[in-house]
Image (cartoon, rainbow, N blue to C red):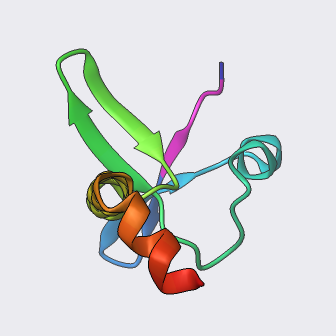
Amino acid sequence: MYTLKLTTVGSSTGVVIPKEMLKDLKLNKGDSLYAVETPDGYVLTPYNPEVEAQIEKGRQFMKQYRETFKALAE
């Protein structure tokens, strides 16, 4: 478990993320981190949930038309 410290950044409030946590999340300075609301609270993730939903729809589409894609690939 990591403890995140809130700090003042200009007129806003920022969060200090430990180096080890950044490494675990495979994040670098300037990357985006998403706070996703769940029934249990918020989850921080480097993955954009909107993009994940689009990828899943694409996978379903490709599965549905697998034979068509095979024919086009020949």
Residue 32's place in the image compared with 3, above or below, is below
- Dominant secondary structure, magenta: loop
| Residue at image location 60% in from the left, 84% down from the top | 74
Image coordinates of residue 73 in percent, x first then y, are 56, 83
Q: Is residue 39 left or right of residue 66?
A: left
Magenta residue check for 67? no
Task: Give the quadrant of the N terminus.
Answer: top right
Q: Is residue 5 left or right of residue 21?
A: left
Question: Where is 6 relative to 54, above or below?
Answer: above
Judge whether 21 appears above or below 42 on screen.
below
Furthest residue to the left? 39
Which residues make up the magenta segment?
Answer: 2-6
* Number of on-image labels: 0
- Give the vertical position of 35 relative to 61 (above or below): above
Q: Residue at x 59, y 79 (%)?
A: 30
Q: Residue at x 31, y 62 (%)?
A: 65
